[in-house]
Amino acid sequence: MTDIRPVVKPNKLKKAIVIMLLTFAISCGGEKIMIRNAEKGHGYILASITLLDGKPKFNNYGLEFKPEGKEIGLFDSNGGLRIQRDSQHYKTDNSRVYLILKELKVGNYEFFDYHLIQNFGYSASHIRSKKEFSIPFSVQEDSINYIGDFTFYPQSNDNGNLFVISDKYDRDIMKLKEKYPRINWEIVQNKALENGVLNESLIEFK
């Protein structure tokens, strides 16, 4: 019987090896993200999400935002700060800290909802805010603004809230520089969020 085996061309083999190496590098804990300059008419925001529970209950955590004042329809897509429990993070005390960088069009935005998902395999549980809220922020062209840390309390904090928004710039700055080494750090501004219309949303500022 003739032994028929696929022939792998050198170029294809080389390409496959490069892809494997890139995949391995991205999966490593010390991941560094090489970002480009923002497109014309765009800017960046930096933020962190902190999960206080050493073994997070939910699979996905997100804070949704949209252009300020825009009504979101059923089939409209909106932006957000979103993480998966197993996303790359660093640990401090009994917490996991997830660093986020997003490129957005210049404009005014507002956070209006949060979204927690617990996946059971055959079904999923979703938790959202009972009422929409409005926490505004803005994006300027070629800007890089740190907008703060969003700390999640799995059993709620002493005030009965799930999320606390605070300025953790001094804590996050070195880790952000490690993860995004090619950012122009000279133009980064600390614009941690300080106020908004919360509407009984289980969110507070600190």
Image (cartoon, helix red, strand yellow):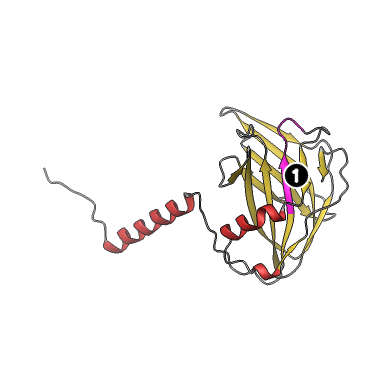
Q: Residue 50: percent from the left, percent from the top?
A: 67, 43
Q: Quadrant of residue 192?
A: bottom right
Q: Residue 182: percent from the left, percent from the top?
A: 58, 67
Using the image, determine if residue 101 lies above or below residue 153.
Answer: below
Using the image, determine if residue 105 lies above or below residue 96.
Answer: below
- Mark 1 element type: loop
Query: Who's the residue at 26% across and 61% down the image?
Result: 9
Q: From the image, which quarter does the N terminus lie in?
A: top left
> Does residue 153 show up magenta in the picture?
yes
- How many C-alpha atoms fall within 10 Å of the one at disc 1: few (<14), some, or many (≥20)? few
Q: Nearer the viewer, residue 204 or 118?
A: 204
Q: Residue 30: percent from the left, percent from the top?
A: 51, 53
Residue placed under numbered mark 1 in the picture:
74
Query: Who's the residue at 57% across and 57% down the image?
Result: 179
The residue positioned farthest toward the left in the image shown: 1
Q: Which segment is the magenta one?
A: 148-156
Q: Residue 164: percent from the left, percent from the top?
A: 78, 42
